[in-house]
Image: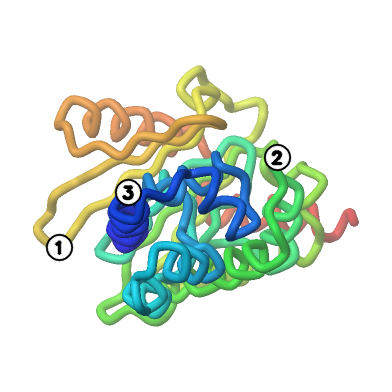
């Protein structure tokens, strides 16, 4: 909201001062498309852009003052609603088919994922997102009362190149927490529902349930009863096929011993 409001103010002042996109972009040393995306709230207006607009549009410091109210978002826009639900959850069930869930990642694993994405992120954003991901893990131990957390990981998650010994040991460490249940779904037990992508089922204090599904280019957060029921059913099927928590711990321990 702060992005959109500040961007809109840039646009209003620019129009009032009869300044073109091209003139403002040149003054701030940005492309016209970048300047336009800031006005539209797609990009965060930068301090440089606000200061240039303030001078060019003779805003007498009113645009530059907006710098104090802008903060770089820690997460991609499509994930922010899910993170808010995660913070409010009293229980959460998470199934992953290719990646370690963010709540269970080591810093090294998180860095490997965040640094190696396309389009690439600048170093500041990489560090912010790694720190934010680590902050989210407070849900494991710091919430009162504890949040009931369940995770089912397809075996491919554990076999990925980034799942090193440190990461596997982290999974074992988390699995020993009283409020966490961790299961492994071996290759030979995979069912069709387990190959349809990751899914998360969350329950809020008011017992409202929501589900989050994510793909490479789109994600969906839904509270529609039909969607919640469908995801809950798939999760139940997957959990029934997965190894028990004790069997899963032994499965991971054998992988650690073999490395």
Question: Does residue 160 appear to the left or right of 53 in the view shown?
Answer: right
Q: Residue at x 81, y 62 (%)?
A: 165
Mark toward the start of the polypeptide (2 vs 1): 2
The colour scheme applied to this rendered structure is: rainbow
The mark lying in front, picked from 2 and 1, is: 2
CA–CA distance between discs 2 and 1?
37 Å
Using the image, determine if residue 9 lies above or below residue 196. Answer: below
Q: For mark 2, what is the residue?
A: 118
Q: For mark 1, what is the residue?
A: 205
Disc assigned to residue 151: none
Question: Residue 221: x, y in percent?
Answer: 31, 39
CA–CA distance between discs 3 and 1?
47 Å
User: Visible in this render: residue 171?
Assistant: no
Question: Does residue 66 appear to the left or right of 114 in the view shown?
Answer: left
Q: For mark 3, what is the residue?
A: 15
Question: Residue 122: x, y in percent?
Answer: 70, 59
Q: Residue at x 65, y 56 (%)?
A: 29
Q: Residues within 10 Å of mark 1 (few under 14, many from 20)?
A: few
Number of numbered discs on residues = 3
């Amino acid at each position: 909201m702060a992005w959109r409001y500040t961007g809109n103010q840039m646009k209003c002042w620019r129009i009032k001062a009869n300044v073109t996109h091209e003139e403002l972009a040149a003054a701030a040393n940005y492309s016209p498309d970048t300047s336009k995306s800031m006005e539209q709230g797609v990009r965060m207006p930068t301090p440089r852009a606000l200061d240039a607009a303030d001078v060019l549009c003779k805003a007498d410091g009113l645009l530059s003052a907006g710098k104090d109210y802008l903060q770089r978002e820690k997460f991609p826009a499509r994930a922010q609603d899910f993170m808010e639900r995660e913070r409010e959850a009293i229980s959460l069930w998470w199934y992953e088919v290719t990646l370690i869930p963010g709540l269970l990642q080591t810093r090294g694993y998180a860095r490997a994922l965040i640094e190696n994405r396309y389009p690439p992120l600048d170093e500041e954003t990489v560090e912010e997102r790694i720190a934010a991901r680590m902050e989210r893990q407070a849900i494991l131990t710091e919430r009162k009362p504890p949040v009931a957390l369940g995770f089912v990981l397809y075996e491919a998650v554990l076999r990925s190149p980034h799942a090193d010994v440190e990461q596997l040991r982290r999974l074992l460490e988390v699995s020993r927490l009283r409020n966490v249940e961790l299961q492994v779904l071996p290759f030979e037990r995979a069912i069709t529902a387990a190959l349809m992508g990751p899914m998360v089922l969350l329950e809020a204090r008011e017992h409202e349930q929501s589900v989050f599904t994510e793909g490479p280019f789109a994600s969906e957060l839904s509270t529609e009863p039909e969607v919640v029921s469908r995801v809950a059913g798939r999760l139940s099927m997957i959990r029934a096929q997965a190894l028990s928590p004790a069997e899963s711990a032994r499965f991971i321990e054998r992988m650690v011993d073999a490395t």
